[in-house]
Image (cartoon, coloured by chain):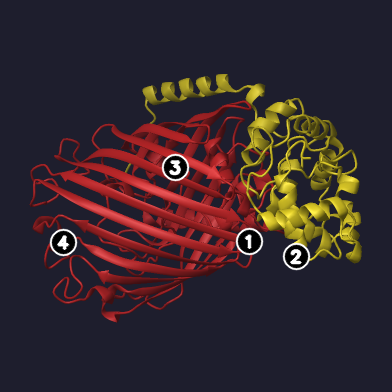
Amino acid sequence: MSSIRVDRLSVNLWGALLLCLSVFTSLNASAVPAFARQTGQNCVACHAGGQFPELTPYGRMFKLTGYTIGSRTIPLSVMGVASVTKNSNSSLAGPKDGVPVFGTGSVFLAGKITDNIGIFAQGTYNNYGGDSGYQGVWGSDNFDLRFADRLIDANSDVIFGLSLNNNPTVSDVWNSAPAWIIYAPTMFGTSGPDTSPIVNGLGAQVAGITAYAMWNNLLYAEVGAYKTANGVFSFLSQGTNNAGQTKLAGSNPYVRLALNHEWGAHNVMLGVFGLNVGIHSDPLDESSPTTKYRDRGIDAQYQYLLDPHTVSAQLSYVRETTSNSIASLGASNDSNTLNALRIKGTYIYQAKYGASLSYFNTTGTTDAGLYSAISANSSPNTQGWTPEIFYMPVQNIRIGLQYYAYQKFDGATTGYNGTNNAKDNNNAFLYVWGAY
Amino acid sequence: MKTFNPSRAGKLLGISLLLAVTACSSPDRSRDLNDATISASTTALQVCSNCHGAKGVSTSPNFPNLAAQSQPYLVKQLTAFRSHGRTDPEGFEYMWGLSSHLTDDQIKGLATYFSQLPPTAGNVDHYGTPESVGRGRVIFEQGIAAESVPACATCHGAHAEGSDQFPRLAGQHADYLVKQLNVFQNTDQRPDGVAMKVITHNLSPDNITSVAAYLETMGPAVN
């Protein structure tokens, strides 16, 4: 698709969006997105302390039962993020440093389709996308079409279903899953380690079908397989050009297990996941050598939800082993490991005032072939903190201030690339997030 | 550039899946609140149980226990949620939407279903200290004459079991009771409880906590 056609399409879509917005506004003065219109409930019913995307126990049930609770309504929502990022070192900052920007806007198709089928599909317009980083591009974002059924009586409860999705772990209902633990990162500053496990990098590149079951709200199991989102599934990777798309070799297995327990106002989850993928070194050549990734994750979440208090904590640790085939990705070693740890704690008062603190620490094998371009000692090791404060004046608007503080970046605290220190990547990120 | 080129196999797979999932739809397992033909027990288990528990006893004190609650009281509350007559946050955040399409018969059916479930054994949250539970028991049984607070047992029953006019309080989550007592005392968000505004007028925060702590400990037949 040419960029001119994309621009024209985006103009038309924005026009349609504005029209929808004005129609909805006249229908319903208290602005809430599609799922809330479907259930008639407030955001806090499904989102912990009202903060998207973290789900409450009830929100998890809503998702597991296929987004089908409530009454069918117009299943459309919109979301936008405007922001300003200020980098600590102007030499690492781009032309948008300190400049207010409208970064991304999303349209959601979200709601109940039948008694057993529902959808959460997000298309995102990135104002700063494309090859240059400054083109407006529409693309597929999170997608989860699911079928669910529930066998429940007074003594036993089994929810089971199928999900067609485009991002491993996006089907998950806990916020410690890689697809959900971070949201609204800065686009014009360093928002985390340069190197991440592959499970973080497959969104809107792949298509997968997973089957899941939750037994007595205690044990959750999910198995599935992912392949490249092309052919009949290419709608799941729109916005990614063929040469830039991650190409998986065949079907790639995903497994997830979690133990969930709720008592009083508390709930806790302990989970593991595994994802094996093979990725072609040349996206345009299906016979090109593959790099094999084995991601093994352990994660945990705790929530205390009792009005007016919301406390939540997440832990995610992913250990990735990579087997490099000859010349596949330019790696020097035959195999590498990468360990990504992330811990986050959040407190919210009255679903209005919140603060969070997250810590991240990525370590990995030294590899000159992979990392020498970014790291003087060829190491991906990165460590830092992200404190945030936020305010939600109404339930669908959030104003937040994040600070990214790096203690180590690409292998060193000072002179990691021969020139810069880790803290040169520090940046402050002020954003306004809104959804309707 | 990728092209949208559905393969025959893909179409077959899609059709097969659609047939499979459509075949699975069943009114016995429906979560549709708009369909008045769905039985009350199905709605209670498929939808209400998410917050109120499969046996009408909720895990989280954000949500009240409904098991063995008085049927007329439940009808009154669901009707008030549906008409937006009950405006406390615990009500409108969750219940306005879910009740909006319920028919009178569905409301009666759900109220009857929950009223017939066995009551909770009580003391699930271990909310109060022995001292506060003791103070609460005195308020429940005798009231506070000096502050014109009547005994709760007068209306709610000797075992707080409730009646047609007054709700069951025995075994209810203390945090929920505290919040509702504050709603009655400080707001007009529950017009049906206007009598409680007068009754709770002189209750201090400590006394509210104590009486809620005691009520939460009460099982089906506390002596």
Q: Which amino acid type is shown beneath numbered disc 4? A: Ser
Quarter of the image that includes the C terminus of chain A: bottom right
**Gap in angstroms between the C-alphas marked 2 and 4:** 59 Å
Q: Are marks 4 and 3 in contact (CB under 8 Å)?
A: no
Which residue in the protein does label 3 denote? A172
Residue A197 as seen in the image, left or right of residue A140: left
Do the dots labelled 1 and 4 sit on one chain?
A: yes
**Gap in angstroms between the C-alphas marked 4 and 3:** 31 Å
Residue shown at 48%/48% (left/top)? A122
SS class, disc 3:
loop
Depth check: A352 or A253 in front? A352
Q: Position of residue B94 (x, y in %)?
A: 69, 48
Residue A379's tag is 4
Which numbered disc flags the more N-terminal residue, 4 or 3? 3
Residue A308's tag is 1
Which numbered disc flags the more N-terminal residue, 1 or 4? 1
Residue A264 as seen in the image, left or right of residue A245: right
Q: Which amino acid type is shown beneath numbered disc 1? A: Pro
Depth check: B136 or A90 in front? B136
Residue B205's tag is 2
